[in-house]
Image (cartoon, rainbow, N blue to C red):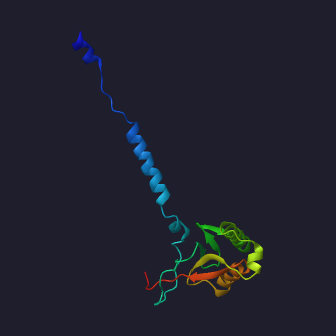
Amino acid sequence: MAARFSQDLKAEPNLTPILDLVFQLITFFLLVINFKSAEMDLSLKLPVIGSARPVETHGQRGLLVLNIDNAGDLKIYGRPIKNIEGYIRNEAQASMLQNRMTPADLEAGEELPTTIVIRADRTTPFRMINRVIRACQDNGFRNFALKAVNKET
């Protein structure tokens, strides 16, 4: 009778720990993925400058990457932004909330700690870049970085 009882038992693997591990790995990789690369419009032909160097991010609390194509259109995550001033105003308000600042702080001479990284196509007219810079300055941004490349790619 004992022999028959042992033949009826089947050993099946418990998949719960393995599924739990896979879920944790997926969650980990989603948390550490670099979303900054998605902000960059790779179709832009950046200007070539021999002294170009990486953007200094030490001491900065945030970066806002603005892509300006050769027609002067502002693109964020590949989507064109029609109301440039409105978009920058919203980003300034978000930066103020994040840094616990009020409009009175900006009027008192303080500046937003966010660095604006401008990636403009080499054929973009300067008046278009200047429009974006002025909109940023009007909303409290004072730290700017213009992106360029060291050599032709």
Front residue of 32/123: it is 32
Residue farthest to the left, as pictured: 3
Which corner quadrant of the image does residue 68 belong to?
bottom right
Q: Quadrant of the N terminus?
A: top left
Residue farthest to the bottom, as pictured: 50
- The answer to whether 105 appears left or right of 23 in the picture is right
Front residue of 21/67: it is 21
Residue 58 shows in this picture: yes
Which corner quadrant of the image does residue 110 belong to?
bottom right
Q: Quadrant of the C terminus?
A: bottom left
Residue shown at the point (33%, 32%) measured from the top left:
13
Residue shown at the point (60%, 77%) measured from the top left:
115
Figure check: 5 above or below 125: above
Q: Position of residue 33 (x, y in %)?
A: 47, 61
Q: Where is residue 148 in the image (x, y as percent from the top left)?
A: 51, 83
Residue shown at the point (43%, 42%) measured from the top left:
20
Q: Where is residue 46 in the image (x, y as percent from the top left)?
A: 52, 81
Which corner quadrant of the image does residue 7 belong to?
top left
Figure check: 148 above or below 84: below
Q: Where is residue 29 in the image (x, y as percent from the top left)?
A: 45, 56
- The answer to whether 135 appears left or right of 7 in the picture is right
Question: How many callouts does the rendering have?
Answer: 0
Front residue of 136/111: it is 111
Residue shown at the point (73%, 74%) measured from the top left:
85
- The answer to whether 42 appears left or right of 104 in the picture is left
Figure check: 91 above or below 149: above
Residue farthest to the top, as pictured: 1
Residue 68 shows in this picture: no
Front residue of 44/8: it is 8
